[in-house]
Amino acid sequence: MKLMIGSDHGGFELKEEVKKYLESLGHEVVDVGTYTPDSCDYPDIAKAGCEKITSGECERGILICGTGIGISMAANKIRGIRAACCSDTYSARYTRLHNDANVLCFGGRVVGGGLACELVDAYLSVEFEGGRHQRRVDKIMALEAENK
Ligand code: RB5
């Protein structure tokens, strides 16, 4: 799978670890930064990363900040993005199955490397179920369209 990954400084170390893990699984990873531990602003990374999803270049993405919250909030402001901030594997799996989340977020100051890789596995190992969930996702997207 071609995947986007990005983080601010709060998620930088974890991004590097998760990126290596994804590459070891054979995924093609597009890293939108940040590329150093220096302070930067997570909305800028969310914008750069989500562009890779909305343009169709990458199928899904992973965004990391200190908590995972700020970067997911920023990502969810971008048309077409459904970002989910998860720190348990059940949510990471079901946000794909039921919400058709195209971006998974978590916090570099919240989860360790082992759990982060398990979150990614849970998220990437399933597909959107559609059916009744499609109707609900359509309603989410209608809210976005109504609130331009
Ligand atoms: C940066 O210090 C921190 O605020 C950011 O990484 C993130 O946790 C915001 O939600």
Image (tube, grey):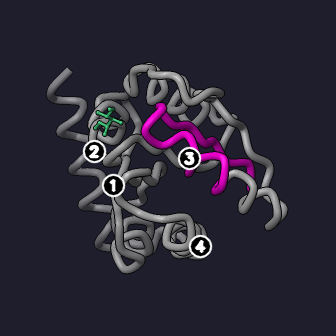
- At a point 23% along the width and 34% down the height, the residue shown is 144
Task: Tell me the kind of residue under disc 1.
Answer: Cys
From mark 2 to mark 3, how far is it between C-alphas? 15 Å
Checking the image for residue 121, the label placed there is: 4
Front one among 22 and 50: 22
Query: Few, some or many C-alpha atoms within 10 Å of disc 4 (few <14, some 14-19, many ≥20)?
Result: some
Residue 29 location, x and y as percent? Answer: 74, 45
- Cβ atoms at labels 1 and 2 below 8 Å apart: yes
- To which residue does mark 2 refer? 69
Query: The magenta stretch spans which residues?
Result: 1-18
Q: Secondary structure at mark 3?
A: strand
Query: Few, some or many C-alpha atoms within 10 Å of disc 3 (few <14, some 14-19, many ≥20)?
Result: many
Horizontal relation, residue 124 to residue 109: left or right: right
Quarter assignment of residue 129: bottom left
Chain-order first, disc 2 or disc 3: 3
From mark 1 to mark 4, how far is it between C-alphas? 15 Å
From mark 4 to mark 3, how far is it between C-alphas? 13 Å
Q: Secondary structure at mark 4?
A: helix
Task: Tell me the kind of residue under disc 3.
Answer: Gly
Task: Tell me the kind of residue under disc 4.
Answer: Asp
Horizontal relation, residue 26 to residue 44: left or right: right
Chain-order first, disc 1 or disc 3: 3
Tell me the quarter of the image containing the C terminus.
Answer: top left
- To which residue does mark 1 refer? 85
